[in-house]
Image (spheres, coloured by chain):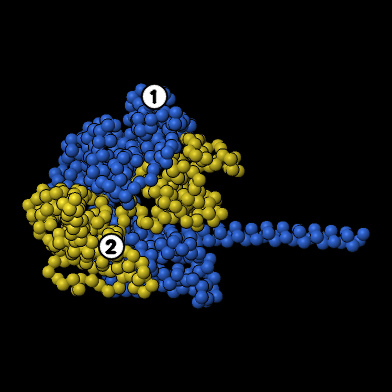
Chain colours: A blue, B yellow
Amino acid sequence: MIRWILIAVLALAVGATGIWGYQEHQEKNAILVQAENTYQRSFHDLSYHMDLLHDQIGTTLAMNTKERLSPQLADIWRLTSEAHNDVGQLPLALLPFNKTEEFLSDIGDFSYNTAIRDLEKDPLTDGEVNNLESLYDKSGEIRDELRKVQHLVLENNLRWMDVQLALATNDKQADNTIVDGFKTVEKTVEGYTEGNLGVSMTGTSNKKHEYQFLNGENINKKQALKKAQALFEVRDASDIKITKSGDGAEVATYSASFHKAGRDGYMDMSVKGGHPLSLIINREVKDPGISLNEGMNKAEDYLKDLKMEDMELFQSSQYNNVGVYNFLYTQEDVRMYPDSVQVKVALDNGDVLGFTSRDYYLNHKERDLPDPELTAEEAKDKVNHNVKIQENRLAVIENDSGEEVLTHEFLGVLGDDTYRIFINASNGAEEKVEKLQGAEAKFDDAV
Amino acid sequence: MRFKRTVILLFFTVLLVAGMPSADGLRPVEAFSPQVIQHGASGEDVIELQARLQYLGFYNGKIDGVFGWGTYWALRNFQYEFGLEIDGMAGTKTKQKLEKASEYDKGFVQEQIRKGKKFTHYGGTPKEQQVKNGGKEQTGKKENEQKDEGTPAEPTAVNVPGGFSQNDIRLMANAVHGEARGEPYEGKVAVAAVILNRVESPTFPNTVSGVIFEPRAFTAVADGQIWLTPNESAEQAVLDAINGWDPTGEATYYFNPNTATSDWIWSRPQIKQIGKHIFCM
């Protein structure tokens, strides 16, 4: 009897230990994942901040006035501190990474000193501009190296926890691609010596406001269904599901969706006026049969069918076998940057696969355009003289404080980069300087 | 009867002869396809365009097969110098002028691209001097390369939306795949859009990685599902979201009503349901 009790108690103890052990194991794993995530975040943040830092320095090169330069330099200062912080979070203590950190603090010092200086009285000297140029080159190299490491980390699912272990145990066998990568980054920076010492996200950060310019009568579900059917090009209306948006929506919409024969579609249209705000059709797209240019014509026709007049192509990009087109509304030949519409076209047969006009309906109205007080020539004078201006026109943009302003838009080249620069047409202020992004080299998987 | 046979024979001979030049790659005149090439395009025609512009000294960038700003200005300068209409597009007239004025060594260019070498294509300089050593290591890759022969070379660069790198896109695709792999396509775009809406929102971190790795923000991150390899539809969805598509109507939260454990999330003003997820402000 006692024996059986003993066995039962022991069995219970073994079972309990097992459960306890399993829970401990689970907890340990959860914590490991969390620690890993913290490292990953710092790492990806670091590479993002280096990306941004490089762009910001590049943009600085094309700026001219104090009103833009000082905040820009302050932003660079902030970014270096962020990047420095990110480096500090990574388990690199055992790795010689001090050159990179020194480089970051050099940029930091430089940008801080120039940002707080009165650039009106005491503008950037040639030496400082040269210095900025070399910082630009160097930060570009670091960015590229970091991107390579980042690509490898993502491609091969490398773990920072393993790096930590490898570094701690000095294990040569362990996969230390990350360590090697960082050593390369470090080497890149070494080329930069102290003797040398002597710029934003492109998307317009729209201030949120109401959709004031949607017009028309409210439509009902039936009408919405009819519209959706036409836009989806679906024969049988019963395949389409329609729902109305909830209380949280900024603007009341009908959402329509269908899934049939390998094609999925989803669209939002405003209840007021029944304007399509966004449309996605997903299907397999075959190899390109038409050019980006023909795709553009299809996109233009589509906009015409939707009764959107005076739309002008502002940007087109080919992503594998789809073309994405960005159109702007023009009024009296003035581009309205806030009124943008994007159209996505399949380049296999020219079907429109997507359309989004939220920005357009958020901002679009007929505007009272003032006459520009500055001529293009006068405005050109306000642009950094190192920038070779190629094109100019008038445009309305939303400035940093979220107001719409009439500007002279200039497209210019400095070094290998192209910039878009906006000069206020009434007071000559440098409203915005953007470095335009080019293509990015593919990664060589053979590395 | 005999006549018929001769005709058939003749027919085959013609076929053979006609087929030959392209078969051994010695086609004397290499020319563009009839498309109009414009800013943002990518592919073989762009490689040829860049190579020809470089031959004439207008284009000094890398021949990477993507029509970027460097190519745009080079083309405009060419159009200006040759008295054509300056529109920055390679239409029929421009291409004809280019073909007349320049030479394009297709074999050379494609070979260098396939081998991943750094090279240029200037006129008047011997080809050997225009290739830098390095690039892809030859060892162990031989088999692959031989297979590549004959297939047209791919562009060595890709278009990326402004402000994002391929890695940013990949990281987002990882998150979208981990969070919404069973969802319809619009549900994936919606999750990607929420990540972007959070980046823009003042109450969330300001970077994509900051938003994704924010503690307790996404379950796929907490349980490690984010490290599953994303499929193509996840990457497509991310690209759509970055390019401006937002099926959620600017939502910053979403949850699965069947598995949500927090009461708080139900108190958020809801916008809509897409697939299994409810999106809210």
- Secondary structure at badge 2 equals loop
The structure residue drawn at horizontal position 15% and vertical position 59%, both measured from the top left corner, is B29
Image quadrant where residue A26 sits? bottom right
The structure residue drawn at horizontal position 20% and vertical position 39%, both measured from the top left corner, is A334
Task: Classify A37 as above or below A290.
Answer: below
**Between residues A414 and B20, which one lies in front from this camera angle?**
B20
Neighbour tally class for label 2: few under 14, some 14-19, many 20 plus, Cα within 10 Å: few
Name the amino acid, label 1.
Answer: Gln
The structure residue drawn at horizontal position 32% and vertical position 39%, both measured from the top left corner, is A352
- Secondary structure at badge 1 equals helix
Quarter in which the C terminus of chain A is drawn: bottom left
Q: Chain of mark 1?
A: A
Q: Which residue is mark 2?
A: B150
Image coordinates of residue B116 in percent, x first then y, are 30, 67
Neighbour tally class for label 1: few under 14, some 14-19, many 20 plus, Cα within 10 Å: few
Q: Is residue B66 visible?
A: yes
Left or right placement of residue A271 versus residue A132 in this view: right
Left or right placement of residue A426 versus residue B160 in this view: left
The structure residue drawn at horizontal position 19% and vertical position 45%, both measured from the top left corner, is A408
Distance between the alpha carbons at the discs numbered 2 and 1: 54 Å
Quarter in which the N terminus of chain A is drawn: bottom right
Image coordinates of residue A75 in percent, x first then y, are 35, 56
Name the amino acid, label 2.
Answer: Gly
Q: Which residue is mark 1?
A: A223
Left or right placement of residue B176 versus residue A235 in this view: right
Q: Chain of mark 2?
A: B
Task: Classify A385 as above or below A298.
Answer: below
